[in-house]
Image (cartoon, rainbow, N blue to C red):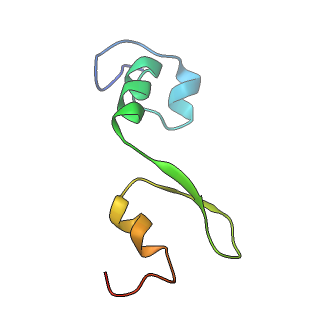
Amino acid sequence: MECTECGAHFPAARAALGYRVCLPCGEQKARAVRHCTVPLNKSNYIVVTNREDLKGLNPKQVGN
């Protein structure tokens, strides 16, 4: 398989997992997005990348 970003070849096992970019390009794309992991009330954890989604998770937020 060829990376869709830089054209470098990467292992077929990585492509079988659904990746279309090589490891260095994938890491660069991942670092470009700011994210955090937050717990949900009486549930599991969720990864949030949009700040507005994070604000909407607070059940006690009043009128902002």
- Extreme residue toward the bottom, this view: 63
Of all residues shown, which one is farthest toward the top?
A: 8
Taking the spot 42% from the left edge, 28% from the top edge, the residue there is: 26
Q: Nearer the viewer, residue 32 or 4?
A: 32
Farthest-out residue, right = 42
Quarter holding the N terminus is top left
Residue 38 position within the rendered picture, expressed as x and y whole percent measured from the top left = 57, 59
Residue at image coords 30%, 16%: 7
Looking at this view, is 52 or 29 the one in front? 52
Residue 3: quarter of image:
top left
Locate the C terminus and report the quarter of the image it occupies. Answer: bottom left
Q: Is residue 10 above or below residue 48?
A: above
Q: Position of residue 2 (x, y in %)?
A: 37, 19
> To which quarter of the image does residue 51 belong?
bottom left
* Identity of the residue drawn at 35% across and 12% down: 8
Task: Look at the picture and state if 15 lies above or below 55.
Answer: above
**Picture quadrant where residue 53 is located:** bottom left
Horizontal side, residue 33 vs residue 19: left or right? left
In front of the other: 16 or 37:
37
Q: Residue 47 at what x, y percent from top left?
A: 52, 54
Rendered view: 11 above or below 62? above
**How many numbered marks, from 0 up?**
0
